[in-house]
Image (tube, rainbow, N blue to C red):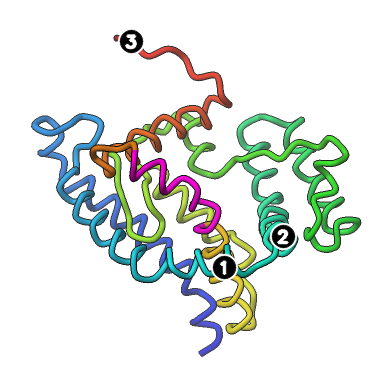
Amino acid sequence: MTKSLGLSGQQMGRRWALAGLLTLAFGGQAVAEGNPKDPYEGFNRAMFSVNEVIDKYAAKPVAQVYDNVAPLPVKAGVGNFFGNVGDLWIGVNSALQGKMGEAGVDIGRLLINSTVGIFGLFDVASELGLEKHDEDFGQTLAVWGVGSGGYLFWPIIGPRNVRDTGGWAVDSFVDPVWHVSDVPVRNGLVAVRFVDIRASLLPADKVVEEGALDKYAYIRDAYQQRRRNQIFDGRPPRLDD
């Protein structure tokens, strides 16, 4: 029983990836007629509405309580801990993208913060000048030449495209948190990480609510621009007019 529950995160990732690919397959005819930036807009807006309900009545209220109650050092420690957990996979993706220097920095960060930083609770590596990077398997696939596919919006995990949905499934499969054998501990870690991430997005909520005539389109365009910057390390080539 414990073993099967331990695979739930991996199974969820595979299901989301499969869902994205099926959406691409069955929605292919809509590409020519719809927005080329968002060929599955009807599906995406429906999923966005579902996510808005989940966020309004569950995710956001919990994140607000956490943000108001948890002292700043606690929130910093939580963010540092999960950031440290991810540095190994970030290093692997840096290496897969041919960024061997950055990969060395990523592994160095992991070693320093896991020891001197007390299991990652303190980001000592940044204080020593080792920059925190942000790489995932979706970016690796992009560097390898895999096309983005259509834009997709998923409840809970948010905006992705077909390529990044598959990349997210791989990221989830190798995530050390999902491989914790003690089910209550694992579920607790997953919940705390989710709440911490949602709390970090609270300052952006007001900006989106006040500045966007169409919240869905605003988030879609922001995601696509940010993702392009990530793939090209902040130096994307100019798009043709």
Sequence order check, earlier mark of 1 and 2: 1
Crowd band around label 3 with a 10 angstrom C-alpha radius: few (<14), some (14–19), many (20+): few
The furthest residue to the top? 241
Q: At 59% from the left edge and 61% from the top edge, which residue is drawn?
A: 175
Q: CA distance from mark 1 to mark 2?
A: 17 Å
Q: Which mark is residue 66?
A: 1
- Residues at circles 1 and 2 in contact by the CB criterion of under 8 Å: no
Q: Which residue is mark 2?
A: 81
In the visual, does 224 lie left or right of 173? left
Sequence order check, earlier mark of 3 and 1: 1
Q: Is there any visible trace of residue 162 in the rendered image?
A: no
Can residue 205 be found in the magenta stretch?
yes
Height in image: 196 above or below 149? below
Crowd band around label 1 with a 10 angstrom C-alpha radius: few (<14), some (14–19), many (20+): some
The range drawn in magenta is 198-210
Q: Which residue is mark 3?
A: 240
